Image: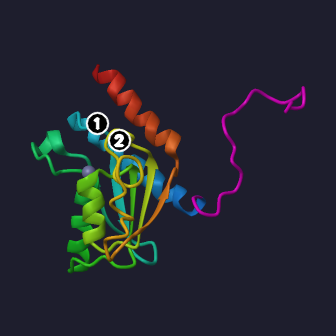
Amino acid sequence: MTDAPTAPPDPGPDPGPDPVRDPWREPMRLALDEAVRARETDDVPVGALVLGPDGELLGRGHNAREAWGDPTAHAELLAIRAAAARRGEWRLEGCTLVVTLEPCTMCAGASVLARLDRVVYGAVDPKAGAAGSLWDVVRDRRLNHRPEVIHGVRAEECGALLKSFFRGAS
Ligand code: ZN
């Protein structure tokens, strides 16, 4: 496999059109904006949104464990809670969680409990991910509600934000 000799320097992977992931690139950009805000309190930069069936932004959140001293203050939980409050009910059927990092067991569990239709995430978390990496809580066939999972949306950017945070912290 040889490229044309006149090819410019490799600009990085260009997977071409991706009908599964492309519709979520813009929401993921907003989730990344949210993730950056976590750094203000020295929290790990993870951001999340919940979108309604028509794409309306219902809730957003960023990791706030350090800010609040709360082990459960993960971006996804905050976004899910905000969306439920906005809708006035705990069922978030038809909604989509968009999060920069693969959810942990708690947040994957919350996605199931909220009856979310879909979980879209950026970077995989091989150390704690519960939506396909270490576990697959979201699609466990023993559960009667299983959100669809779309992963790898802006994964490079989501991962780079985390890497730069941990590089800076070490
Ligand atoms: Zn979590």
Seen in the image, is 113 located left or right of residue 35? Answer: left
Question: Image quadrant for the C terminus?
Answer: top left
Residue 44, quarter of the rendered image: top left
Residue at 25 percent of width and 46 percent of height: 63
Compared across the picture, whether 75 is left or right of 15 comes to: left
| Label 1, label 2: how far apart the Cα atoms are | 6 Å
Horizontal and vertical percent for residue 24?
52, 60
Reading the image, the residue beneath label 2 is: 36
Q: Residue furthest top?
A: 170
User: Residue 169 location in percent, x, y?
Assistant: 28, 23
Question: Do tag 1 and tag 2 residues touch (Cβ < 8 Å)?
Answer: yes
The magenta stretch spans which residues? 1-21
Residue sitting nearer the eye, 143 or 35: 143
Give the quarter of the image for residue 59: bottom left
Q: Which residue is mark 1?
A: 39
Which is more toward the observer, 9 or 15? 15
> What's the residue type where badge 2 is placed?
Val
Principal secondary structure, stretch drawn in magenta: loop
Residue 91 at x, y percent in the picture: 26, 79
Mark 1 residue type: Arg
